[in-house]
Amino acid sequence: MRTFFPRRVRDYKARFKMPGSQPLRVACIGAGYVGGPTMAVIAAKTPPEAVQVRVLDLSAERIAAWNSERLPIYEPGLSELVFAARGRNLHFSTAIDDGIKWADIIFVAVNTPTKECGIGAGAAADLTYVELAARQIAAAADTPKIVVEKSTVPIRTAEALSAILEACGRTSFEILSNPEFLAEGTAVRDLCEPDRVLIGGDLKTERGRQALEALVELYAYWVPRERILTTNVWSSELSKLVANAFLAQRVSSINSISALCELSGAQIDEVARAVGLDRRIGPRFLQCSVGFGGSCFQKDILNLVYLCESFGLNVVADYWRSVIAINDWQKQRFTARILHSLYNTATNKKIAILGFAFKKDTADTRESAAIDVCGSLLQECAKLSIYDPQVPAEQIWSDLTRRCRRTRDELAAYVTLAATADEAAAGSHAIVILTEWDEFRTLDYSKMYKSMCRPAFLFDGRSVCDLKALSEIGFLCYAIGSPDDSRIQLR
Ligand SMILES: NC(=O)C1=CN([C@@H]2O[C@H](COP(=O)(O)OP(=O)(O)OC[C@H]3O[C@@H](n4cnc5c(N)ncnc54)[C@H](O)[C@@H]3O)[C@@H](O)[C@H]2O)C=CC1
Ligand SMILES: O=C(O)[C@H]1O[C@H](OP(=O)(O)OP(=O)(O)OC[C@H]2O[C@@H](n3ccc(=O)[nH]c3=O)[C@H](O)[C@@H]2O)[C@H](O)[C@@H](O)[C@@H]1O
């Protein structure tokens, strides 16, 4: 059989124990939320004699953090994995060219944000970083490589990658698509026990099949074979966008119904439970909220919309665009409700913001609903006291200065960062819950109430509170999807 890759790539799993055999060399360009945890799990799940992993990034600061005691991202269970594998078969480095030369398999897990200018601005994916990574690989590689598209990319990006690599490189490349489905906050669990691993490859050529099999073998160390799905490259690329679009669509669907519940007397949790018990629908992703955030849902739907439009499928594009429209509306609706309840003026009123991350168990704030809600309240000249258990202060300042287009000094008159929820609430007119951190479920709300102005309001954007208990304490409450507290002014 003709072989294209070094011997250690073929059947390495069976051979690694043979004297003189070398481990498979895996590199990853991009040490972010995906590259870091994914490589940590590969290293943790494979014997060092069989697999060695290098994570590469342009950012010296990020790499230094991965090599330190304080990792650059917060993810439950991650530090334990990294500390155990680091130096054994997991290495973090800025020596990108070296890493490329060294590797057999190179994952590309760089960022693919929404384009900010030019054709497709505001919708298409910006593939600058992917292309740069491809050019770096082409320039440095001198032996055959398997290049794995891990970043989320538009359909047919592999074709562009292949063209760049083949045109500029001195060796041959095989491109695989292997999109990542981990969710932040549960990344380690998702990677260790994935619902599926999706690998797209060129099934028509022997070389393509060999590359695909090498990656399957790598995952097969810990993922049952039946959960490793192989498809053609285009199906794999598109499946990732579609999976995110479907998830986001569920959140927008339940959020749209939350508005109806508030006006009609139905209770969103009860509706979601009743609907989700139908096995055809299922119970997950039916939690109403102030709006979905995170770096990917909006960007990937926009990407899908752009793709549909470029194929002339405008009705399909409009359908998916409405998922984002509902999300934007939900955030605006929530903020408007706060304002109306506070007698239509928030000027100089202290408001306690509990939670700034886009979901619990992460310090990530990308596209967090909190940024929009806080930004709108600041436009109303409210004084915000923000508490989040994980998000660093610098991140909050950076998000708010960008959102409000004001300097930190200008904002400092209106924003303070609190060290505890109690501190944020003291002297405030209202508590606003924007992230579903577990600790917000068990706060001493009676104590907080005593330290607040009267009437004391609580706006729950995440359904974490027991509204009945809070009402008994004396709070005037509004929770998304719950029938309105008749004591609150609505218009
Ligand atoms: N964040 C998430 O939960 C998920 C993200 N994804 C996708 O994975 C990709 C990466 O996302 P994140 O890890 O969140 O991004 P990130 O922004 O956290 O990390 C990307 C890293 O790539 C580095 N980088 C960019 N160009 C480089 C180059 N040429 N050479 C070396 N390093 C380079 C950046 O310095 C950065 O550290 C995106 O396409 C995203 O859509 C997929 C699933 C989940
Ligand atoms: O491509 C990606 O980046 C990832 O995007 C999401 O993961 P993530 O954004 O980390 O987190 P989710 O748990 O999906 O939550 C996204 C947003 O939806 C919100 N959400 C989620 C579920 C729900 O029922 N209600 C709800 O409002 C969350 O609070 C959060 O703001 C997907 O779940 C991952 O499969 C995917 O890999």
Image (cartoon, rainbow, N blue to C red):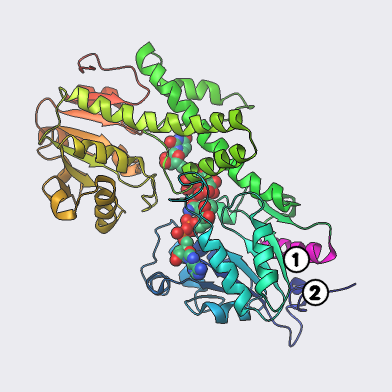
Report which quarter residue 18 is drawn in. bottom right
Disc 1 secondary structure class = helix
Whole-percent x, y for residue 134 in the image:
60, 68
Give the residue drawn at x 55%, y 26%. Answer: 276
Report which quarter residue 341 is drawn in. top left
Horizontal side of residue 452 vs 295, given as left or right: left
What amino acid is at disc 2? Phe
On screen, 28 above or below 327? below
For disc 1, the marked residue is 211
- Residue interval drawn in magenta: 205-222
- Residue extending furthest bottom? 20
Residue 177 makes an appearance in the image: no
Q: CA distance from mark 2 to mark 1?
A: 9 Å
Magenta-colored stretch includes residue 86 = no
Give the residue drawn at x 18%, y 34%. Answer: 380
What amino acid is at disc 1? Ala
For disc 2, the marked residue is 4
